[in-house]
Amino acid sequence: MEVVFVIYPDISLLDLAGPLQTITWAKEHGTDRLGYQSTIVSLGGGQVPSDTLIAVDTQPMAALSGKHIDTLIVVGGDGVYAAIKDSSFLDAVSALAARSDRVCAVCSGALVLAGLGLLDGRRAVTHWEDSDNLATMFPDVLLEEDPIYIKDGHIWTSAGVTAGTDMALAIVAEDLGREAALARAQALVTYMVRPGGQSQFSRVLERQRLETASRFEDLHRWIRANLRKDLRVEELAGFENMSVRSFYRLYTDTMGRTPAKAVEMLRMEAAREMLETSGTGIKSVALRCGFGDEERMRRAFVRLLGVAPSEYRARFRLAEGVG
């Protein structure tokens, strides 16, 4: 199967390397036959600089004129904002996409697909740092901020950096079977296979930069110190010496989420840290973080992160003696 990676100047090298490494050596299950033939292209071909010291050798997109493509993958990187202003680049990618059975984007590469109109009316995801820009520039996209990858019809999009590897493993599983994908995951020493609906675990409270500059920084610090309390909106408004109605409106407008959601996320962050760094029992974690009981914490984890607390710990707990 033919897989084509589209790049441009100032791509994120890991956005390319992760999926490329995954796909290049994927084998049909039970055989030594490689499942894919990979090509890297750019608008004009030649060496294209990445965001590291390494440049990438490419073929010109025109060299694939008329060729059928099984999977087209547009790579992400800071250079995407210049790339989507280049009509020649967009026209060339559009021509490739029209001949592709599957069209994918890693990280901010989703902006290229959005610029071509391929994401209009479709569910899509990108790196959380690019979400606001994508939503503003392309309001017809049904943007979701949390999943690590989304498949909507023949269009796939993924969140940032390592999520591209997760998407590539899911593609291998769809094409060659789960056993083939598991073999690649084992070779890459990575978890097999994170579900696409799983949250981008790197997000904390949604944009910590907002919290840092927020007038509610002291409130958040107080909440973290009092997670076991009954943190209803009346309690939070009292801390701010505001009426409930005024506090609710100001907080929601400022932080982009309700006070109740913020409390839940702060409890979630505390629980995640305990699960990652300690051997505290899950029941005790739930009590210490204010969930009340283990089942309530489990429901929150499944709803927000796509995994139960026990599975989260199994995946992300730091090994003893490391660090």
Image: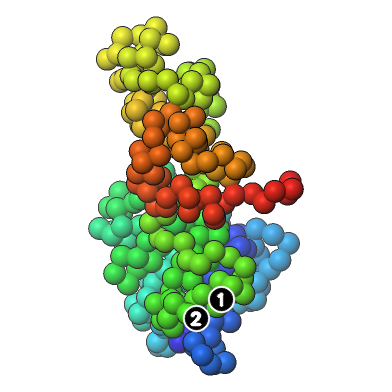
Q: Position of residue 139 (x, y in %)?
A: 30, 49
Q: Position of residue 291 (x, y in %)?
A: 40, 32
Q: Name the residue under label 1.
A: 184
Q: Quadrant of residue 94?
A: bottom left
Q: Mark 2 points at which residue?
A: 180
Q: Residue at x 35, y 65 (%)?
A: 151
Tell me: 245 left or right of 322.
left
Residue 248: tell me if it is visible: yes
Residue closer to the observer: 140 or 34: 34
Q: In which quarter of the image is the N terminus?
A: bottom left
Q: In which quarter of the image is residue 185?
A: bottom right
Q: Residue at x 46, y 61 (%)?
A: 194
Say what secondary structure mark 1 lies in.
Answer: helix
Q: How crowded is mark 2: few (under 14 residues within 10 Å), some or many (20 or more)?
A: many
Q: Which residue is drawn at 54% across and 81% down?
A: 26
Q: Where is residue 261 in the image (x, y as percent from the top left)?
A: 36, 32
Q: Are marks 2 and 1 in contact (CB under 8 Å)?
A: yes
